[in-house]
Amino acid sequence: MLTELLIFVFLITILSSCLLTPVMIKFGYAIKAVDEPGERRVHKKAVPRIGGIALIATFIIAFFVISQFVDLSYGILLGVLIIGATGLLDDLFQLTPIQKIIGQVLAASVVIFMSGITIQYINVPFSNEAVAVPYWISIPITFLWIVIITNAINLIDGLDGLAAGVSGIAAVSIFVLSILMGNVVVAFLSIAIIGAVIGFLFYNFNPAKIFMGDCGALFLGFILAVVSLMGFKQVTTISLLIPFLILGVPIIDTAIAIIRRAIQNKPITIADKSHLHHKLLEFGYSHKQTVLIIYLLATVFGVTAVAFSQVSSMASTIIFIALVLFIEVLIEKFSLISRTYRPILQMFDKIKNKTS
């Protein structure tokens, strides 16, 4: 019965997203809510940027369908509406960073205090020991998690289909883990995200007919942050690292961007063209190739997250070390921090020179 219901929600969300997105394309042109080509843009013509409305509308439909099968807190729905409104206002009127943060904090507050979704336990990495988090620590950590993930997805929204695809892959990882953990609510919500993203990608993959805009990017980041937090309630079955791995690509890209701008004495809020997708384009990969490479990276992180939940502490330690080395080499290879930062690659070069 559960399988049939999950398939039903999946199909409903794909269909809704497929039907609503073309409507937003026409509406975007009608109200002139379009992204024009520019210095930091990779597209060559004006494209509607309000596709996030279709994603949010699809999620709302899914929410009411799912609520017929399981109990859902309306705090989640209200939080989605607030974050969606924040993103839409930014798409239409260009909000300041502070105004956007206020909207994100308000959406997070609704979820935390209306729905009671907080980080309650933290696993000691590479062990089965869980530590209870005091309430006064839990609240700020939960706020940080939601705001960071919300903005991380927004920051990688730089190429056709990139943010949507990475979010969909993260949702697949959450779905698999929720099935393994027996968390039915998270399974329903994550399958709804997957369906919404797939339907949207028919129009958003390169060459995109519509962009999700801040409305869609903030929504996807927000709902992924919330759904992954709901999985924390059964944290004794997973490692603290798993939610970070699931969202590894946007988290790491955001962290590197902060480090890079700090080194260059630039404000964190100032955009640049040194994100992973920019660097891959610089290396000569096409638009589609760049997006697919990052999809592959997101899949690697997702598979690693699932593996962490199934293997021994020793195996998870080995996987973690290998993944850290892989990330470091990636950072150096594509000069994500700077062109002179190459400690591991320089060490490999020295070893190679000595053995040759």
Image (spheres, grey):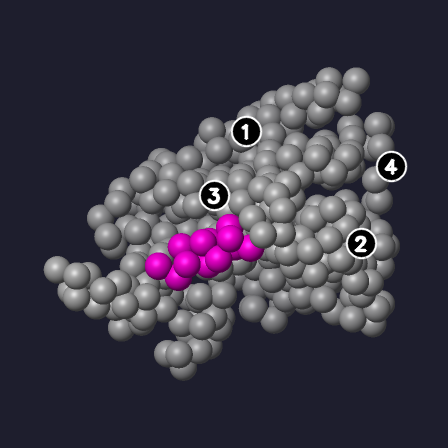
Give 252 or 62, whichever is nearer the viewer. 252
In the structure shown, which secondary structural element does the residue marked by tag 2 occupy? loop
Residue projecting furthest to the bottom: 265
Amino acid found under the numbered disc labelled 4: Asp
Left or right: 354 in relation to 254: left
Dot 1 or dot 3, earlier in sequence: 1
Residue denoted by label 4: 71
* Residues shaded magenta: 317-329
Amino acid found under the numbered disc labelled 1: Gly
In the image, residue 15 lies in the stretch drawn in magenta: no
Residue 287, horizontal then vertical, whole percent: 31, 42
Callout 2 touching callout 4 (CB < 8 Å): no
Viewer can see residue 222: no
208 vs 1: above or below = below
Q: Residues within 10 Å of mark 1 (few under 14, many from 20)?
A: many
In this rendering, the count of numbered labels is 4
Please identify, in this view, whether the residue under mark 2 or under mark 3 is nearer the observer: 3
At 63% from the left and 47% from the top, the residue drawn is: 312
Give 289 or 201, whichever is nearer the viewer. 289
261 vs 203: above or below = below
At 21% from the left and 68% from the top, the residue drawn is: 350
Residue 284, horizontal then vertical, whole percent: 22, 48
Please identify, in this view, whether the residue under mark 3 or under mark 4 is nearer the observer: 3
Residue denoted by label 2: 117
Residue denoted by label 3: 300
Amino acid found under the numbered disc labelled 2: Ile
Dot 2 or dot 4, earlier in sequence: 4
Give 162 or 82, whichever is nearer the viewer. 162
Residue denoted by label 1: 199
Distance from label 4 to label 1 (Cα)? 26 Å
In the structure shown, which secondary structural element does the residue marked by tag 4 occupy? loop
Dot 1 or dot 2, earlier in sequence: 2
